Amino acid sequence: MSLPLTLSRAAQLLGVPRAVLQKHIAAGELPSHDGMVNTEDLQKLYPDVELEDSGAFERIMQIKEQAFAKRVRERILPNQEILAQRLAAQSEELEEVRRHLAEYHRLVEALRARIDEMLETAPFPQLAELARRIDEGLAEVLASEAPADRLEVLDDVLRVMTAQVKVRPSGHEFFVEGSETVLEAALRAGLAPSYGCRNGNCGLCKARIVSGQVKQIHPTDYPLSASERAQGHALLCSNTAVTDLVIEMIEASRPDDIPEQEVTAKVKQVTPLTNDILLLHLVTPRSQRLRFLAGQMVTLSVSSATTNFRGDYPIASCPCDDRNLLFHIRRDENDAFASRLFSDPFKPGDLVSVFGPFGEFVLQKDSSDDLLFVACDTGFAPIKSLIENAAAADLPGLLHLVWAATRPDGHYFENQCRAWAEALETFSYATLVAPDAAAAGTAAAGQVLQIPDFARRMVYVAGPAEFVAGVSDSLKSAGLPDDRLKYETV
Ligand code: FES
């Protein structure tokens, strides 16, 4: 029997990005109807898939945790109550299938008996042939020892472990795993849902549950009206999914959709990446996180009674983790905040004011284009955020990074690039070193121009002004349309 699956579910079962399956579909190797594929065709394409080594869980874990370095999946299993409800639902389904099978069997036996009666009075050879074929067919079915379809078995397991959520009107899909809330799952999946406090107070995460069942797992103070409840509204930050869901949810698609916020965060750690670059790790209060789109910037400031040091920096982490904000700060005597950080490094617990987000250097998520990232030095920071977000959202295009450095030790996160390349079949990268930003721009543009069809990709460029100008001018002169280029000066 062949089971139809959405592309997201099939990718989850096999532990591969959706882009890989989409390539098989485009190449005519995997039939697809209305966006669905079936287990039989998947099994032909991945004949060696086994429950034990398909790696669905492990590879997803690897991608999320290597790419995002920490957090997210504290518990893989749903809580006992939800597990029990999902198992009960699956048992009901199984019981219904058993009942249908028993009825079909009785029907076939009754028809077979009727044929015998008819043969006694009218021994037509066609009837005898029909009786023989029924007997042989039944014997074959009862003797069959064909192994269960492994993908279907894995799908059954995943349906107990996770719930699939389809979002209207965007059509996005994601999976609620373990005991996470629907909001946490949406963020982990790289979406940009509307939310605020994340603790049941503001009501901004309110969404309509069109079908399926949710369960409240955190207390809330926000009062849903009787009519909102009657229409099926629920707070996504305090509910988890018991069953697969279809929901109507507001999502940010442009920077304008995200309000400006002011958050006082604590320094968690300051770590040298090179002699001239520090990694600043801030943690927001649990109840006041920063909502932003990947690639955006914020203003950081520290104040004392007499001084105020401030600077604008791109966030180097993914919005899927809105508490842990990372920044790559370069030594720069013209930058008051950076100078203060290098001369008198912050200590864990120090307070830093975060204002923002701002900036248009964000992903166009509803496109299936291949993405090309071109960074120089700490221009890698917003690019890292974009790549992590693209990976979390499982965007369908290929991701390629060209990272130029103006110092030999400038690829301060090359381990991270290697980890992405190992975890994501759709990611590749190249590095280069040049004596200054202008030369880096010329060299990086030269590499990009050798990529086939580069002008059909969406290109994101970040780095010093000379680098951005050099790469942008070269690519536009070579035919890259304006609307396929986004850039940020860092
Ligand atoms: S985010 Fe504020 S109530 Fe859910």
Image (cartoon, rainbow, N blue to C red):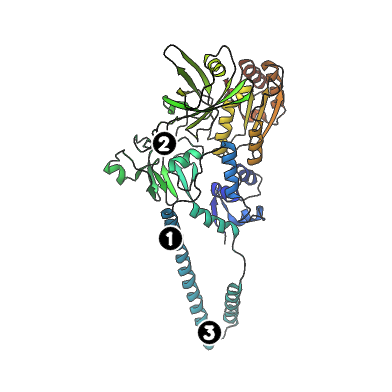
Quarter holding the C terminus is top right
- Residue 206's x, y, as percent? 37, 39
Secondary structure at badge 3 equals helix
Q: Is residue 484 left or right of residue 446?
A: left
Residue tagged by mark 3?
116
Is there CB contact under 8 Å for labels 1 and 3? no
Disc 1 from disc 2: Cα separation: 32 Å
The numbered disc on residue 223 is none
Residue 100: tell me if it is visible: yes
Asked if residue 23 is positioned above or below residue 282 in the image, the reply reads below
Q: In terms of sequence position, does the residue under pointer 1 or pointer 3 come before the other? A: 1
Residue 367: tell me if it is visible: no
Q: How many residues crowd around disc 1 within 10 Å: few (fewer than 14), some, or many (20 or more)?
A: few
- Residue 96's x, y, as percent? 45, 65
The kind of residue tagged 1 is Ala
Instruction: Specify the quadrant of the image occupied by residue 470.
Output: top right
The kind of residue tagged 2 is Ile
Residue tagged by mark 1?
88
Asked if residue 152 is positioned above or below residue 468 in the image, the reply reads below
The kind of residue tagged 3 is Asp
Residue tagged by mark 2?
250
Q: In terms of sequence position, does the residue under pointer 3 or pointer 2 come before the other? A: 3
- Residue 7's x, y, as percent? 56, 47
Disc 1 from disc 3: Cα separation: 42 Å
Q: Nearer the viewer, mark 1 or mark 2?
A: 1
Q: How many residues crowd around disc 3 within 10 Å: few (fewer than 14), some, or many (20 or more)?
A: some
Secondary structure at badge 1 equals helix
Instruction: Tell me which residue sits at (59%, 76%) in the image.
Output: 139
Instruction: Tell me which residue sits at (55%, 28%) in the image.
Output: 316
